[in-house]
Image (cartoon, rainbow, N blue to C red):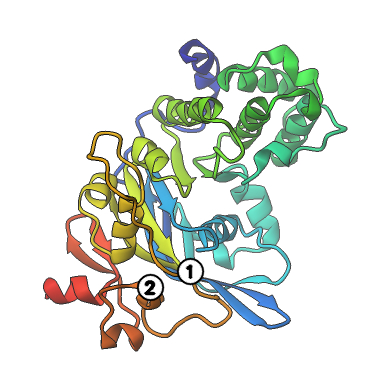
């Protein structure tokens, strides 16, 4: 794997300097709010979410299904499905608010060049009747007009070496690939134009544990060797703990806790985060009965007032039902949106 990655590093470093200053913010998201319009009303999928990520860092987005993780990813690339709309907020990439950019500029300058996305269910994202090589070449030529088809094909071979697939397999059709190979091919396509930020949305979906571990190891290699910035979306806390320096916990469209991964996992403060950590088995601890979080996530067509977690929270107070808790700093590199925690730290 290490030899394969070296084959592509020389090209990649033309556009991204190795060892970039990690104190420089690559992405800043401020009060991002995204709704989906339906016949029954607006689904408040993401509300007032704010976070930042520095160059070379990895941020993990965790939470239950339907909490807004994928919506954030689609918003960052402005590829929301019909009915989806960014209602307010800023998405600042290298100093530019892309929410205000025209669609043409976003397509030419942001997608695939600045930010790239490995979609959830990426194994089924390729056209089954077009060769894998041709699909990746199309993506390269669409975003880099000055490159020839031959040069693009040579890059595809290097990309396949990078992700640990035999370059000759690029001439195959997607249905001739295993699930793990298709996932690797999608990662190769995502990094084809040397994006500064790669978003991996549930990269282990539908893969067995062995192949899943290989894909995660590949993402770690890409991050460490190429200095790539990464957003890893997953409901599996173990994957995030292994790969990411920062972790953000989402619930019902809100970020309820964010900070460095060590603080989040060793000292979870929000009741929802505590529930997620306790619900994850630990092979080194004593055998105890697993405790799940009671209840179900709310309907985002009509979410609860105040803190959206209060109907399921054993510590809920009267203020939790009326006022939305702000995301406040409780210690260095650790923020929590919880009235109970903020009251203790007041």
The crowd level at tag 2 (other Cα within 10 Å; few <14, some 14-19, many 20+) is: some
Which quadrant of the structure image shows residue 185?
top right
Residue receiving disc 2: 312
| Number of marks | 2
Depth order, front residue of 70/155: 70
Which of disc 1 and disc 2 is earlier in sequence?
A: 1
Question: Disc 2 versus disc 1: distance between alpha carbons?
Answer: 8 Å
Image spot of residue 116 (x, y percent): 58, 44
Whether residue 16 sits left or right of residue 258 in the image: it is: right
Please give the label number shown on residue 296: 1
Which quadrant of the structure image shows residue 29?
bottom left
Q: Is residue 28 visible?
A: yes
Mark 2 vs 1: CB contact within 8 A: yes
Please give the label number shown on residue 9: none
The quarter of the rendered structure image containing the C terminus is: bottom left
Image spot of residue 295 (x, y percent): 44, 70
Whether residue 23 sits left or right of residue 217 in the image: it is: left
Residue, x 32% and y 38% (percent of image)? Answer: 21
Q: Is residue 21 above or below residue 220?
A: below
């Amino acid at each position: 794997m290490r030899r394969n990655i070296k084959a592509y590093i020389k090209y990649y470093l033309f556009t991204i300097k190795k060892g970039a200053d990690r104190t420089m913010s690559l992405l800043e998201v401020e009060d991002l709010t995204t709704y989906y319009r339906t016949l029954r009303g607006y689904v408040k999928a993401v509300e007032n979410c704010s976070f930042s990520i520095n160059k070379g860092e990895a941020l993990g987005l965790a939470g239950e299904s339907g909490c807004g993780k994928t919506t954030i990813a689609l918003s960052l690339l402005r590829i929301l499905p019909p009915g989806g709309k960014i209602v307010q907020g800023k998405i600042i990439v290298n100093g530019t608010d892309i929410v205000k950019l025209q669609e043409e500029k976003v397509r030419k300058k942001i997608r695939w060049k600045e930010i790239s996305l490995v979609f959830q269910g990426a194994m089924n994202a390729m056209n089954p009747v077009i060769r894998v090589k041709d699909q990746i070449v199309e993506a390269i030529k669409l975003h880099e007009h000055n490159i020839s088809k031959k040069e693009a094909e040579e890059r595809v071979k290097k990309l396949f070496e990078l992700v640990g697939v035999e370059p000759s397999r690029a001439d195959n059709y997607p249905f001739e690939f295993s699930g793990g190979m298709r996932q690797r091919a999608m990662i190769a396509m995502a990094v084809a134009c040397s994006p500064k930020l790669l978003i991996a949305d549930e990269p282990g979906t539908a893969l067995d544990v062995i192949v899943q571990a290989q894909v995660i190891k590949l993402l770690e290699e890409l991050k460490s060797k190429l200095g790539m910035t990464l957003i890893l979306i997953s409901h599996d806390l173990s994957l995030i703990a292994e790969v990411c320096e920062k972790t953000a916990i989402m619930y019902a469209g809100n970020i309820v806790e964010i900070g460095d991964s060590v603080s989040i996992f060793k000292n979870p403060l929000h009741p929802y985060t505590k529930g997620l950590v306790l619900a994850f088995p630990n092979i080194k601890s004593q055998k105890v009965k697993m405790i799940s979080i009671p209840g179900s996530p709310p309907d985002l067509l009509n979410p609860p007032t105040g803190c959206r977690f209060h109907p399921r929270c054993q510590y809920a107070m009267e203020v939790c039902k009326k006022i939305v808790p702000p995301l406040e700093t409780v210690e260095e590199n650790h923020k929590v949106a919880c009235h109970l925690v903020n009251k203790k730290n007041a």
